[in-house]
Image (cartoon, rainbow, N blue to C red):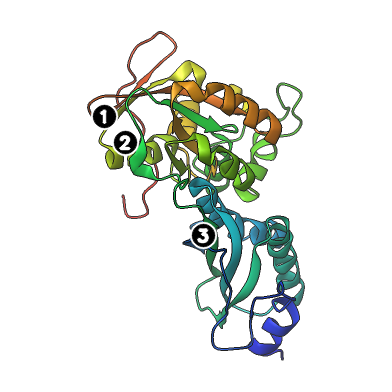
Amino acid sequence: MASEFDLISRFFKRPVPAGMLGGGDDCALFRIAPGLELATSKDLLLEGRHFFPDVDAFTLGHKSLAVNLSDLAAMGAKPIACLLGLALPSFDESWVARFADGFYALADQHGCALIGGDTTRSEHGIAISVTVFGEINPTQAMRRNAAKVGDDIWVSGQLGAADVAYRILAGSLKDDSSQGLFGLEGSLLAQTRASLECPNPRVFLGRRLAAHTHAAIDISDGLLQDLGHILQASGVGARIDGRLLPVHPALAQLSQADRRHAVLAGGDVYELCLTAAEDQRDNFERIGLEAGVPLTRIGQIIAGTGLRVMDDAGQCIEPLPQGFDHFRK
């Protein structure tokens, strides 16, 4: 039977860049460039809570790192390295190999070396913890407390698909579709599942936008909830035009209530929500085109407090759907 150390040696001990000390010692070592600051973040993924048992191991390896890289993207940081904690009920060699391949494929894409971590046996499903490290010019870090009255509010990519896929898999939303819309093929789940299980962290986009942005956050718990964190930290309010929201086309077949919940409150999006001065519109549009990522202006930061979302008729949506909270019943 393979040991814990066999698992690490065979699947998680690939070479690290010169100048780094990776796994094998009590600590890993790495440097950051002079004049830059260290950015770090950690996320925990639990089977049954953040992913389903039938998830493909390669995509789970990808997502385990992607959700952390998304935090670096929201700060405008360049990834450097990461640590992986992995708890498994048993050692399935083919599963671990695919997980490692998915993890390393994304790590290599963003120059984020795996330099250490830990493995253990779990009694209650798979648990994954990743810590990422990045470097950033402190004068360009996109913080939550820097939004200004008059700022435009922008989001990257499309919204809603990940929430729909999650609710279908969880059994709380029925998938009645058999044919796709707008040239998309397959069931509603087939059209949305990749958004849930294989998100694309906007690392390059975040780094390009950092010099033009006041505040930013990644959308992990729903657009309204995460934008609300910016508003609270900055002491401002916001007005959103619901007609401008970039909705994933597959959601057109849903009821208005389901579509509204997915777009405004659905989590696991890992797109960026940013605020920037009006004179930055040309820069945002240019950078979005260069990066190949749609950037949509959805509203404005206003004086006061609170968040208002207007529907297609120009009426304020009330009550607003709530984002995800692990401890909310």
Name the spot of residue 152 as percent of width and height, x first: 43, 24
Q: Residue visible at 68% across and 28% down?
A: 289
Residue 174 lies in what quarter of the image? Answer: top right
Q: What's under tag 2, amino acid-wise? A: Leu
Sequence-earlier tag: 1 or 3: 3
Question: Residue 207 bears which disc, if any?
Answer: none
Q: Can residue 255 be seen in the rendering of this structure?
A: no
Residue topped by disc 3: 48
Residue topped by disc 2: 231
Q: What's under tag 3, amino acid-wise? A: Gly
Q: Can residue 138 be seen in the rendering of this structure?
A: yes
Q: What's under tag 1, amino acid-wise? A: Gly
Q: Is residue 305 left or right of residue 90?
A: left
Name the spot of residue 58 as percent of width and height, x first: 72, 60
Residue topped by disc 1: 306
Sequence-earlier tag: 1 or 2: 2
Residue 22 lies in what quarter of the image? Answer: bottom right
Name the spot of residue 223 as percent of width and height, x first: 44, 36
Answer few, some or many: residues within 10 Å of disc 2's Cα (few below 14, many 20 plus, some between 14 and 19): many
Answer few, some or many: residues within 10 Å of disc 3's Cα (few below 14, many 20 plus, some between 14 and 19): few
Q: Nearer the viewer, mark 1 or mark 3?
A: 1
Q: Label 1 to label 2, Cα distance in Å?
A: 8 Å
Closer to the camera, 233 or 38? 38
Q: Nearer the viewer, mark 1 or mark 2?
A: 2
Sequence-earlier tag: 3 or 2: 3
Q: Is residue 19 left or right of residue 303?
A: right
Q: Secondary structure at mark 3?
A: loop
Q: Label 3 to label 2, Cα distance in Å?
A: 32 Å
Closer to the camera, 226 or 179? 226
Q: Residue visible at 58% across and 45% down?
A: 207
